[in-house]
Amino acid sequence: MKIEDCRIIDLPKISDPTKGNLTFIEANKHIPFEIKRVYYLYDVPGGGDRGEHAHKDLSQFIIAMSGSFDILLDDGHHKKKFHMNRAYYGLYLCPMIWRELDNFSSGSVCLVLASDFYKESDYIRDYDEFTKEIKKKVSH
Ligand code: TYD
């Protein structure tokens, strides 16, 4: 559950000069989890921020299906920023990572594949609570 466990994963891309590109994702093959839920962010207004939370158990894979945005990750010790702007790669996020998404370009679409159904109890929405949880895990 460190920032090094989060990584960009390149996806297969079938290119055809007359038909365009096709990319696919298979659970447990291209991404390291079973997909139980898919959601997407779109029509994010200029200056809009999303995320600003961590998940206790959820794994996610985030793709810029269209346009671009930034993802800032924070494991309580280190921070890392990713610029997402292609549909043929995504960012894998393991549990217990604080994330902030911003700098959405106009018309951008952010697709998220998730390892579980929506559960509010899996969220940590307060940054101080997040750092406390990280410290607890380190001391165990
Ligand atoms: P949230 O995950 O907080 O969005 P973001 O971090 O991108 O700002 O979700 C926003 C709202 O949508 C919140 O009330 C919970 C609800 N929601 C669902 O009902 N199901 C879902 O799968 C997701 C992702 C959110």
Image: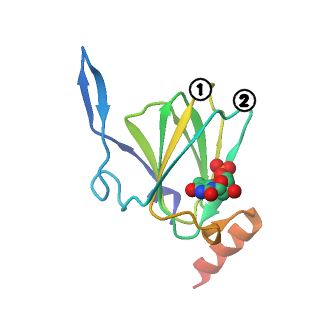
Q: Nearer the viewer, residue 15 or 128?
A: 15
Residue 2, given in percent of the width and then of the height, sits at 51, 62
Which picture quadrant has residue 109?
A: top right
Q: Amino acid at mark 1?
A: Gly
Distance CA(mark 1)–CA(mark 2): 10 Å
Q: Amino acid at mark 2?
A: Gly
Residue 117 in view: yes
Q: Nearer the viewer, residue 81 or 90?
A: 90
Residue at the bottom extreme? Answer: 140
Q: Secondary structure at mark 2?
A: loop
Q: Determine whether the beta carbon of the residue marked 1 sits less than 8 angstroms from the nearest atom of ligand 1.
A: no
In this view, 79 is above or below 54: above
Q: Nearer the viewer, residue 70 or 36?
A: 36
Residue 98 in view: no
Residue at the top extreme? Answer: 18
In this view, 44 is above or below 123: above
Q: Determine whether the beta carbon of the residue marked 2 sits less than 8 angstroms from the nearest atom of ligand 1.
A: no
Residue at coordinates 71% horizontally, 74% vertically from top-left?
132
Q: Residues within 10 Å of mark 1 (few under 14, many from 20)?
A: few
**What's the image's color scheme?**
rainbow
Q: Which label number is shown at residue 46?
A: 2
Q: Which label number is shown at residue 107?
A: 1
